[in-house]
């Protein structure tokens, strides 16, 4: 069985989105800079990382990530199933997406995503989803794509987090093109 892995781009000052984040400005002011290394990936290392997360067998995402992205048109990559954590009902525009399941039960979402992914990893999206998964002991790994920019404000990955202190074991550090550093950690519960 694969691992559940959060992939998250972050500024050097710790922000995953810039200031003034709204539905129409999903990454906040300047937040697009955090993902420039992905579209298209620059060079061999960054391409390897993109191929890695695009070869996962399922996705678990928070509503706040899924809905502003218009649900990736119902197909994040290669027809893998997507579980969306939400306390709200499925919006009408997403209700006809056959690969998408809305639930508020994080344990169920992770269990079903793992089952669907088989030996492949599960891609985890969203800060709140990551925090809930850590609190529930469901997240196996965190991969931070540290981008050489200072956003000066915005949303932090673990801001207002209520989970207990959790030790991490670094299992990989790769220097990517454009100054991005890819850091992977295993959580030790």
Image (spheres, grey):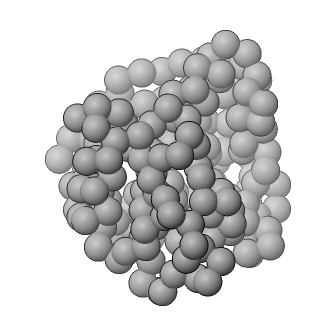
Q: Is residue 15 above or below residue 40?
A: below
| The N terminus, quarter of image | top left
| Residue found at x 58% / y 20% | 48
Q: Is residue 132 left or right of residue 127?
A: left
Residue 140 figure quarter: top left
| Residue found at x 78% / y 30% | 40
Provide residue 105's location: percent of width, then percent of height: 29, 73
Residue 175 shows in this picture? yes
Q: Is residue 76 above or below residue 126?
A: above
| Residue found at x 66% / y 45% | 11
Residue 148 shows in this picture? no
Provide residue 170's location: percent of width, then percent of height: 35, 27
Provide residue 6's location: percent of width, then percent of height: 44, 46
Query: Between 75 and 130, which is closer to the camera in this rendering?
Result: 75
Residue at the outermost left position: 189
Q: How many marks?
A: 0
Q: Is residue 80 left or right of residue 188?
A: right
| Residue found at x 37% / y 74% | 103
């Amino acid at each position: 069985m694969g691992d559940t892995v959060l992939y998250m781009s972050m500024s050097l000052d710790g922000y995953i989105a810039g200031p003034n984040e709204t539905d129409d400005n999903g990454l906040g002011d300047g937040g697009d800079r955090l993902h420039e290394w992905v579209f298209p990936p620059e060079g061999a290392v960054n391409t390897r990382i993109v191929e890695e997360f695009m070869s996962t067998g399922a996705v678990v995402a928070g509503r706040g990530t899924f809905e502003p992205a218009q649900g990736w048109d119902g197909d994040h990559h290669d027809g893998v199933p997507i579980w969306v954590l939400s306390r709200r009902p499925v919006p009408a525009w997403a209700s006809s997406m056959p690969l998408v399941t809305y639930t508020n039960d994080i344990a169920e979402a992770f269990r079903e995503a793992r089952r669907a992914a088989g030996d492949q990893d599960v891609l985890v999206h969203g800060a709140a989803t990551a925090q809930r998964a850590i609190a529930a002991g469901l997240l196996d790994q965190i991969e931070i794509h540290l981008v050489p920019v200072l956003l000066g404000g915005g949303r932090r990955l673990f801001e207002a987090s209520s989970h207990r202190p959790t030790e991490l074991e670094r299992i990989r550090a790769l220097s990517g093109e454009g100054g991005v550093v890819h850091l992977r950690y295993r959580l030790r519960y």
